[in-house]
Image (tube, coloured by chain):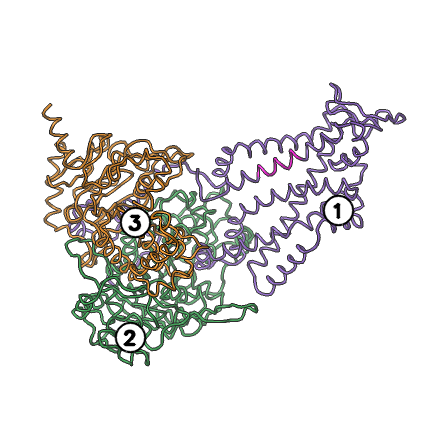
Chain colours: A green, B orange, C purple
Amino acid sequence: MTDQATTPTPDTDETPVAAPTPADAPTPIRATPGVLEGEEPSVEALERDWQRDGGEVPSEEPLADPAHGIVEGEALLRVSGLKKHFPVYGGLLRRQVATVYAVDGVDFEVRKGDVFSLVGESGCGKTTLGRTVLRLVEPTAGTVHFGALDVTRLKSSELRRLRSKMQIVFQDPFGSLNPRMPVSDIIGEGLIAQGLTDRKARDRRVGDALEAVGLRRDYTRRYPHEFSGGQRQRIGVARALALEPDFIVLDEPVSALDVSIQSQVLNLLLDLRKDFDLTYLFISHNLSVIEYVSDRVGVMYLGQIVELASSEELYRSPRHPYTLALLSAIPDPDPRRRHKRLVLKGDVPSPVNPPAGCHFHTRCWLREQLGNPEQCVSAEPDLRELMPGHKAKCHFAEQVSGAKAAEFAAEHSTVVPAVVDA
Amino acid sequence: MTAEATVAEISVTIGERPAGTAPGEDILLDVRGLQTHFHVMDGTVRAVDGVSFSVPRGGTVGLVGESACGKSVTALTIMRLLDIPPAEIVGGEVWFDGREILALPEEEMRHLRGNDIAMIFQEPLTSLNPVLTVGDQISEQVRLHLKVDKKEGLGRAIESLRTVGIPNPEQRVKQYPHEMSGGMRQRVMIAMALSCEPKLLIADEPTTALDVTIQAQILELLKAVQERTKSALMLITHDLGVVAEMVDEIVVMYAGQIVEQGTAEQVLTRPMDPYTMGLIESLPSVKKRGGRLSAIKGVVPSPFNLPPGCRFAPRCPYVWDACRTTSPELIPVGGHGQRARCLLHTPAGAPRRAAVFDTAASSGTTAGHGA
Amino acid sequence: MAHEAKSLSTPTGSAPIDVEADAIQAIGMGIAQPDDATALRREEAGADYEVALESLNQWQLAWRKFRHHRLALMGLGILASFFIIALVGPIVWPFDFNTIPQPDVIVYQGRPPSLVHPFGETGGLQRDVLNLVINGARTSLFIGFSSMALGVLIGTIVGSLAGFIGGVLDNVLMRTVDVFLSIPLLFLILVASRFFGNGNVMLIVMIFAFFSWMGIARLVRSLFLSIREREFVEAARAVGVRDRRIIFRHILPNAISPIVVSASLIVAANIISEAFVSFLGFGVNPIYPTWGNILSNALTFIPLGNWWWPFFPGLMIILTVLAVNFVGDGLRDALDPRTRA
């Protein structure tokens, strides 16, 4: 390996390191594609660590870096035909009585260096989609290509090693950190699992990760409850970052945080993307946040992407009636711009029993305006390309416009029924 | 003497009255110098520390702040719904409809709650009884407060469900809370709160748990029923967008104190307190794309270890020495009823003031999102 | 590529981060032309603020809360002193259990408490009641606590397996629990101690353990099912942590508190059961004193007004069970992670 200075010594903590690493000679972890390397541990050290850590066997065969050679702008992640259906069991015999179509046929690409966002309301499947891409949830059908590698076909040992390349940051800064573990273990256990068994090298990496997210190195002995919400979320980011991934799924990373802390964490995430050449899949329900961070956006409704475009395009000229309603629903913090908004009626239908034809037809204002054309109920629209890079899943996408929406909003009462009869 | 007289005059015009006297007829709720503390093992938390504001009849006031700033405790103190101990109302007065309600016997207070003041909570599921149908719950409340018979109570329940946009209310009254979606339950809560035609409706983060399109439904609904029933609205939220759409006056809280108050337009377009300025500036918007957001640095101070001077001083970009030792008062700014708690607006801050607010003016402090 | 990708270990100081534009656009908020991205980030994070509350780990926090629970503290005191008495009492107390003061004299009546015999003397062999109670404490406490420990061990293993692996194994194990729970327990204990116990203390411990693991197993299984779904477990999976470490480092530590609380209740139940079984003569060999045995022997002397003989061992049982329950109560509050105060 490249750094001889840090060849491990028998690693009791008291033993001084023979040749300490100079502070300015960092371990170039990306020097070789493949295994996450630190120091080459001795057999004894491995044994000891293995026993201490409950049987973590460091991987031996290197995993070829799937992201190797992909330059900015090329697709790093390709998702096609991805489905995740959850069975619903019921009755006395625990038979499957229904299916939740959480993710129901999704295709998209994330280009290297981009922030690709998924936006939608609760139950639209965006969170399941994020988990399925990482195979934290097993897909029902479809493929996820990470570089040249089909994630859906990996064996579990290969998958475990791929974890260092694909990471996730969770929504809940309280729930996602084990309350019984100090920060050093929370961040460090991923490194152990990836084979970085040398204690000192690991501690250094943990410290570096903490510093990269704006926390102090000496926080490692503290427990999660000693931090504020924003700081905990930074620890969650550090946990992902410590593995030096290429790709991170950010699942509502700022939704649980206070307004002033949200902006801190958003700044951090965008800085880190630059610093470490990261690619993000950003999942959120907050349209203002999405608009600020994203390069491309996919709008989800009932397990499907209904509109896909660059961020500018999507916010300037949305082409799906649902997107328009979402945008109109954002409360504007400028009281001088109070506007008559387009309020959708009813709730999101259950993903157990999505409406026939276009899933959105039960709540669609455009359909109502067009006099309820039969097509919306009888045929499911395709996700059509309307112009290069802009797709929408609507039969009448060409007719969607802000003017029509305003016209509709002006004509209708803003107190809308809570349910729509199917 | 003359100086004192001026101060007194100013405080009258901005709604503060001497202790023990009722406010004018036009003021429905007048909170004065309210202090609520919590006694816990680590010490005493001054959750609400000298909060004064008023809600005019039929008016709308938004209480804005981040978590643990004391906004919800303020509401619970007004409703007298806190557990005492660990809570203790240390000082202050709450005048509602010409009566001081902190001193009312519990029996009268119970009558007041639900009848004259109603409250909506963030999570409707926890405030609805899971073993009673929604119809039973609304009609029970109606019968209790309006002294009508069972049939009329149910009729009113159906009627109020209809007004909040629940179709087939005759069927829906027979449903249990768990059979409804989150948005529906919140509608039921609103129906219940409004069934007795309260004079004041307190809504504590009514849409925080809801999706964007459902939030839009509920906000429009609240606006519509508030306009129709002419009840006053006190909206508690962390979402500047929501207050901007819903209320006329805004009270901004930080670490148990009010740091700024004024009309919605004043506070959101010309904020005078560095904290409010920071909050508004930190909202992500398309205009800020590519650059960093101007985040408020640091974290909210621990309630056990509040900074000795201004509580915002450790996070404030304009801080100077005086801020770390002197606690600023909430003082009038600009002469149109807006008030802010910042030393910049005292004579001592005069030399710095221009630098801070001229930049703000030239960069066009506009909030939010340009959709 | 516009810039070099950094490795984590590279000092981040040289990062060309474009903050100026924004700092100007912002109304001067906070970002005073930083030349160092790390410093800026750290300033935003509030990293240099003192964390105001003292740093305590979970056990320190629990102890702090426990201390404020007066009854629990009293219970802990009682239990601790009983343990000390049971351990050193027989050495210190002048009367030896194995020697009978006057083997050839059998009296009809015992003697009431006196200065020399504060708990009085028994009828028959005229033994010192305090001496009996102390020696009985040894056996009774030993049986109560060690049968609990064994039961908790069995229950935790069964519950963990059922909860973590699930599927068929879960079904088999949980139906076994159901079967065990449907057996009339007391009857079975009586039969088992008659046929297998032979008055042997270790066997009694095993029998009690054998019948006190089902509650723990159910509890642990449900804890596993719920903790397994918590986000931090998913996060551990996402960084590649293996099942074994997930069980031992993530799930079990977070399941400890409820296990400890219900274990305390098992202790109380087993001490009472021991007394009961021994009282009926099915428990520990009557030549060894346990609190139950003493009661049993005292039975025939109660009509003679020898109240001190059953009274003191009975009192010990009540005190111990109360103390254990108080401690359990205190633990329940102290280990509740939702409260800090």
Q: Which residue does the image show at 11% across and 41% down from the upper left?
A: B336
Please state the extent of the stretch shown in magenta in the rendering: C318-327
Q: Which residue does the image show at 72% across and 39% down from the upper left?
A: C275
Quadrant of the rendered image containing residue A47: bottom right
Q: Position of residue A98 (x, y in %)?
A: 47, 71
Left or right of residue B257, residue A140 in this image: right
Quadrant of the rendered image containing residue A312: bottom left
Residue under numbered circle 2: A393
Q: CA distance from mark 3 to mark 2?
A: 38 Å
Q: Residue furthest right?
A: C104
Are dots 1 and 2 in contact, CB under 8 Å?
Answer: no
Q: Chain of mark 1?
A: C
Q: Is residue C63 above or below residue A398?
A: above
Please tell me if label 3 and label 1 are on a single chain. no
Callout 1 secondary element: helix
Q: Amino acid at mark 2?
A: Lys
Q: How many neighbours does mark 3 have within 10 angstroms: few (below 14), some (14-19), or many (20 or more)?
A: many
Q: Position of residue A238 (x, y in %)?
A: 37, 52
Q: Amino acid at mark 1?
A: Leu
Q: Nearer the viewer, residue C15 or B124?
A: B124
Residue under numbered circle 3: B203
> Is C187 contained in the magenta span?
no
Eye-nearest disc, 1 or 2: 2
Q: Is residue B315 above or below residue A59?
A: above
Residue under numbered circle 1: C203
Q: Position of residue A347 (x, y in %)?
A: 33, 65
> Is C319 contained in the magenta span?
yes
Q: CA distance from mark 3 to mark 1?
A: 64 Å
